[in-house]
Image (cartoon, grey):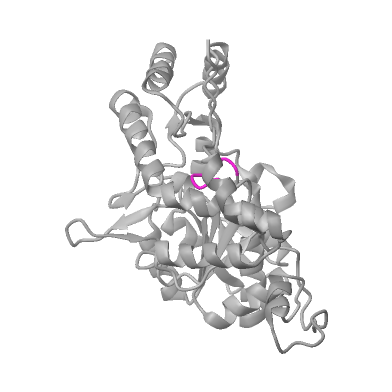
């Protein structure tokens, strides 16, 4: 019997090699023309104004928070309200920047609950980190309003949201998250890690609203150096191409040409692949909808995840594994990790963390695979 995996990325190998071969022949795999092409392609695709290709979404979040701290004068221990129901990268990035994650509870969409966020605001709150779990927009509009009301900075962890759109009131009109919905966000960070909707082996994309902040993020992504290697190499007037200044303490956070080539090809097919994910989700919904995590109204989700909430989740995982079906869990509650310190209770998050099950979701699934997953789950529930 064929194993059915939770995730299985699809790479268009020959197209990827066609993109990459000229640069391998030149021996240039560092940031340069390919990474710049990807950044331009991403702004054209999303409608966002500025983009920086990074080596991961984690790095993008870290850069965003570091830049925001520098530019907005935040201090050690200032607070960022975040969710405990996320991969630890979200909250690690807050700690990397010398800030303190404060956990608010979640809503039915597994995203931040605006009322819980409101209750966590203190004089030291500087920002809210919204995570679009599974590609869901949740109550992002209400979170955005709350940030405006309290003059807080909004950062969106869009790791699952490549291709997520918001349906506007005008018939048939769609807009990417961060253009109108989430339009006041200071930063959005996307993931192109190997199991995401746009797999590039690894990588991320940082989009920031303010050009000065984006410029600083770009500089910090390459050790704080004032001019990157590619720009110095191309400069016909630079006699000393090796010479540069280092005005900031930066990081090794930039992406490279190898991953950019994969991402450029993947971006051509992102909407097509997400449409396939939506068809799979519809089939799951028809038979398992009673247990499904809902998608927010007017959200055209990327469907990175299809999540159920089920009793005896761990037993169900074992039984599915016996049938060579391998679901996942997204996520354990970060509140269980002492690293994040003492936190107020988040009962909805704690409850969800015990019930959530992510079904196999990728474009290599056949109709028979999907039917096999559904039948197996139905037999156990």
Residue 131 image offset from top left, x and y in percent = 50, 54
**Above or below, comparing residue 111 to residue 68 in the picture:** above
Q: Position of residue 148 (x, y in %)?
A: 42, 74
Question: Residue 203, can we see it?
Answer: no
- Whether 328 is drawn above or below 79: the answer is above
Q: Residue at x 52, y 16 (%)?
A: 320
Judge by depth and name the residue closer to the eye, 79 or 221.
221
Dividing the picture into quarters, in which one does residue 376 lie?
Answer: top left
Q: Is residue 351 visible?
A: yes
Span colored in magenta: 194-199
Viewer-side residue, 141 vs 34: 34
Query: Residue at the location (47% across, 53% down)?
Result: 112
Question: In screen coordinates, is 175 left or right of 321?
Answer: left
By secondary structure, the bulk of the magenta-drawn segment is best described as loop
Left or right of 376 in this view: 290 = left
Left or right of 141, for residue 167: left
From the top left corner, tell me how far across and down residue 328 is, in percent. Answer: 55, 30
Q: Quadrant of the C terminus?
A: top left
Q: Nearer the viewer, residue 227 or 359?
A: 227
Give percent across and percent down for residue 280: 36, 31
């Amino acid at each position: 019997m064929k194993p059915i995996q939770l995730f299985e990325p699809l790479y268009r190998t020959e197209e990827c090699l066609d993109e990459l071969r000229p640069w391998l022949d030149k021996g240039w795999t560092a940031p340069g023309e390919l990474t710049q092409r990807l950044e331009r392609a991403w702004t054209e695709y999303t409608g966002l104004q500025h983009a920086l290709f990074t080596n991961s979404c984690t790095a993008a979040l870290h850069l965003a928070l570091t830049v925001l701290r520098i530019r907005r004068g935040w201090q050690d221990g200032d607070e960022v309200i975040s969710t405990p129901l996320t991969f630890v990268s979200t909250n690690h990035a807050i700690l990397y920047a010398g800030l303190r994650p404060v956990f608010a509870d979640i809503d039915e969409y597994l995203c931040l609950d605006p009322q819980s966020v409101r209750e966590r605001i203190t004089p030291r709150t500087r920002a809210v980190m919204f995570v679009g779990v599974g590609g869901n927009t949740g109550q992002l509009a209400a979170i955005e309003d709350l940030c405006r009301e309290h003059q807080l900075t909004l950062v969106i962890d869009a790791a699952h949201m490549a291709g997520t759109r918001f349906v506007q009131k005008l018939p048939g009109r769609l807009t990417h998250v961060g253009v109108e919905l989430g339009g006041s966000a200071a930063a959005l960070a996307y993931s192109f890690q190997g199991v995401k909707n746009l797999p590039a082996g690894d990588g991320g994309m940082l989009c920031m609203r303010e050009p000065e902040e984006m410029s600083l993020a770009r500089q910090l992504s390459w050790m704080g150096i004032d001019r990157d290697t590619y720009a110095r190499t191309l400069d016909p007037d630079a006699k000393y191409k090796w010479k540069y200044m280092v005005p900031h303490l930066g990081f090794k956070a930039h992406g490279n040409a190898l991953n950019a080539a994969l991402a450029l090809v993947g971006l051509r097919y992102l909407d097509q692949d997400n449409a396939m994910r939506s068809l799979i989700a519809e089939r799951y919904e028809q038979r398992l909808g009673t247990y499904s995590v809902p998608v927010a109204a007017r959200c055209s989700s990327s469907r990175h995840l299809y999540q159920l909430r089920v009793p005896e989740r761990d037993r169900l995982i074992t039984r599915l594994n016996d049938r060579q079906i391998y679901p996942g869990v997204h996520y354990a509650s970060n509140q269980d990790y002492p690293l994040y310190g003492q936190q107020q209770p988040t009962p909805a998050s704690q409850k969800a963390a015990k019930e959530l099950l992510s079904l196999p979701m990728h474009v290599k699934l056949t109709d028979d695979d999907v039917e096999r997953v559904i039948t197996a789950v139905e037999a156990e529930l």
